Amino acid sequence: MIVVTTPTGSIGHQVLDALLDSGEPIRVIARDPSRLSSHTRQRVEVVQGSHGDIDVVNRAFTGADAVFWLVPPDFHAENVEAAFVDFTRPACDAIKSQGVKRVVAVSALGRGTAMAAKAGHVSASLKMDDLIASTGVGYRALTMPSFMDNILRQVKPIKSQGIFFSPISMDRKLPTCAIRDIAAVAARLLLDPSWSGQDCVPILGPEDLSFNDMAQIMSQVLGKPVRFEQISFEAFRAGFIERGASEAFAQAMVDMLEAKNEDLDTAEPRTPESATPTSFRQWCEEVLKPAVAS
């Protein structure tokens, strides 16, 4: 039995899709099961509710061999680190009481670096890893840089103005990965009963790129000029506040990107095992271009 959290989220639904044809029994935790396709609902067992609720995770983890774990962002959190850890605490109790064997979770790069102590959402993710590991369960933390798919949040200015934004330096070359590759690695681990112990699994994509590099590739793929504009960290923070985020959430985003701008994500060397296949050009052709066109 494999349990999938966030089955309608951007990562979770791709993990679920990768598992559906495996023949293994699958159970999902969903706040709103109606968001699952009818095809999916026919093939999985659904436990309705939040995976931050002890009663829900106790039901969902009963008889479970493996769990895909992802903490959804809390836009209104008053303390981001506490939000990650407190949300995960009931699951850790259920992992122990229900005898779950293996957990695969979405985390972040940076462990062991000087920047990790004040890296906002990254620091919170690493605290979450420590809490899950403390249960003694077999654990694989998927440690990742920023996602290529985050650029989809800026489809509107890319389409209307040929521009996208970030406070990270325009020439800073950093790793980036596609969500499809995260899902593929997660599914492989969830379907493999042979591993045990606790470790990190870096997912780094095939290359390091700057935002200027990305703008050039986007221009070529979209057939129109696209440029990158660096904004201040204060403007970046203010944008989250304007969209209704808490002060703590917005500051955690700033702290995370400041750490990335100081090479938080480049401390992990790329190896044949951590270099996932989807290039930024391929992602632009197959994901960004259709999104801009629509």
Image (tube, rainbow, N blue to C red):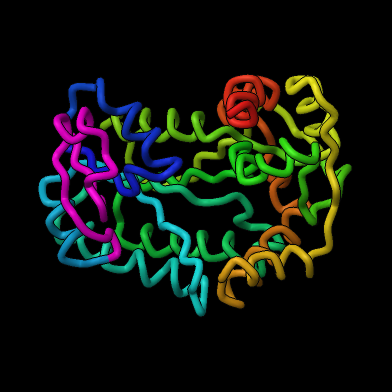
Q: Quadrant of residue 41?
A: top left
- The front one of 34 and 269 is 34
Does residue 150 appear left or right of residue 197 in this picture?
right
Residue 25 visible here? no
Q: Hey, which residue is sitting farthest right in the picture?
A: 171
- The front one of 137 and 294 is 294
Residue appearing at x 51%, y 77% in the figure: 79
Q: Is residue 184 above or below residue 239?
A: above
- The front one of 220 and 115 is 220
Q: What x and y, as percent, mark residue 204?
A: 62, 35
Q: What x and y, as percent, mark residue 25?
A: 15, 32
Image quarter of the C terminus: top right
Residue appearing at x 78%, y 25% in the figure: 217
Image quarter of the N terminus: top left
Residue appearing at x 77%, y 52% in the figure: 166
- The front one of 71 and 220 is 220
